[in-house]
């Protein structure tokens, strides 16, 4: 069952929605407490997040570093704008590949949905070209993961 | 099948993937592409040749220029990439499901 919906909206937005079988409070905590974030926001299979700085207050810094364990990696920095426990997070972020990508302004909402939570992540990019480039970059990492899997298959 | 293999190996190079990403924003000349990638025009031309042979880009003639754009098959490749991005996100959130279930268990464990 694919529960994730990813769609573009207008020229500059990307909207991701997903449901979780847990309370908004738990999902909010899983997005804000570094020890929990490091358990799941690890990206492609075999990758980890050795560094997770997450200062959850307006103006607080964000720095996530990912590693493939073989010397490869990339990082993300950002700042929090607003936090409303346990319903809303607003922040900006940019990837460093290693050159920084344009700022992505992100609003994340957690709403009670029956016994669970509906999460809506609304990204706003500076312009249409930046959005295409961001989607392409994400695709690039997806491609990396699939090539890594292909290599494993070929080596086996 | 030959075209598919050629497309796959053409996509295995990060510069060529970056060129395709740039072309999602519209047609470009060798000169347009050489600038952001900090590469010489002959080096870019070699990559374009590989992409063209693989059927991922098409080139038209405009005076002395040969602007390139994405071929329809590249567009379907890009749709596959979008699927992979979706899958990468979905893997993160599947792990989050597991973490949330553990959090719930721990909470219930401390209550009893």
Image: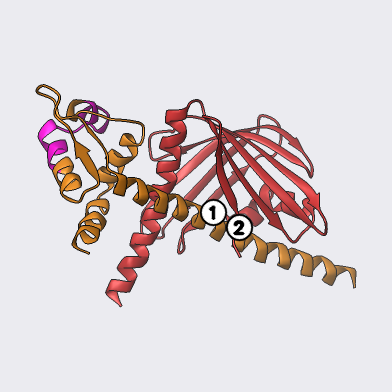
Chain colours: A red, B orange
Q: Is residue A2 magenta?
A: no
Quarter of the image where the C terminus of chain A is located: bottom left
Q: Left or right? Give the position of A140 relative to A9.
A: left
Crowding at dot 1, Cα within 10 Å, few <14 / some 14-19 / many 20+, comes out as many
Kindly identify which residue carries mark 2: B93
Q: Residue at x 46, y 58 (%)?
A: A44
Identify the subunit bearing mark 1: B
Label 2: which secondary element? helix
Quarter of the image where the N terminus of chain A is located: bottom right
Give the quadrant of residue B84: bottom left
Q: x, y percentage for residue A69?
A: 41, 60
Magenta residues span: B32-46
Q: x, y percentage for residue B12?
A: 26, 54
What predominant SS class does the magenta segment belong to?
A: helix
Q: Nearer the viewer, residue A97 or B16?
A: B16
Label 1: which secondary element? helix
Asked if residue B105 is positioned above or below residue B48 in the image, the reply reads below
Asked if residue B35 is positioned above or below residue A137 in the image, the reply reads above
Q: x, y percentage for residue A118?
A: 73, 50
Q: Is residue B39 magenta?
A: yes
Identify the subunit bearing mark 2: B
In this view, which residue lies farthest toward the top? B63
Q: Residue A49: tell me if it is visible.
A: no
Kindly identify which residue carries mark 1: B89
């Amino acid at each position: 069952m694919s529960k994730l919906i990813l769609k573009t909206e207008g020229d500059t937005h990307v909207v991701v929605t997903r449901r979780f079988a847990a309370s908004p409070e738990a999902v909010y905590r899983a997005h804000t407490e570094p020890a929990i974030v490091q358990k799941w926001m690890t990206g492609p299979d075999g990758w980890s997040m050795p560094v997770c700085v997450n200062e959850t207050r307006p103006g607080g810094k964000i720095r996530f570093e990912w590693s493939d364990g073989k010397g490869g990696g990339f990082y993300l920095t950002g700042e929090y704008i607003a936090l409303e426990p346990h319903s809303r997070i607003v922040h900006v972020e940019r990837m460093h590949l290693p050159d920084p990508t344009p700022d992505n302004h992100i609003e994340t909402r957690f709403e009670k949905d029956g016994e669970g939570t509906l999460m809506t992540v609304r990204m706003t990019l500076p312009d249409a070209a930046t959005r295409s480039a961001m989607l392409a970059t994400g695709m690039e990492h997806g491609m990396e993961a699939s090539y890594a899997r292909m290599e494993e298959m070929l080596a086996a | 099948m030959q075209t598919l293999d050629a497309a796959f190996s053409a996509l295995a190079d990060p510069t060529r993937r970056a060129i395709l990403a740039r072309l999602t924003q519209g047609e470009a000349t060798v000169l347009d592409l050489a600038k952001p990638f900090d590469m010489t025009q002959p080096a870019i031309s070699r990559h374009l040749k590989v992409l063209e042979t693989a059927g991922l880009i098409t080139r038209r003639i405009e005076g002395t220029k040969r602007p390139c754009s994405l071929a329809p098959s590249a567009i379907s490749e890009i749709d596959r990439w979008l699927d992979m991005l979706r899958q990468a996100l979905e893997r993160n959130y599947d792990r989050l499901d597991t973490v949330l279930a553990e959090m719930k268990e721990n909470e219930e464990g401390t209550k009893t």
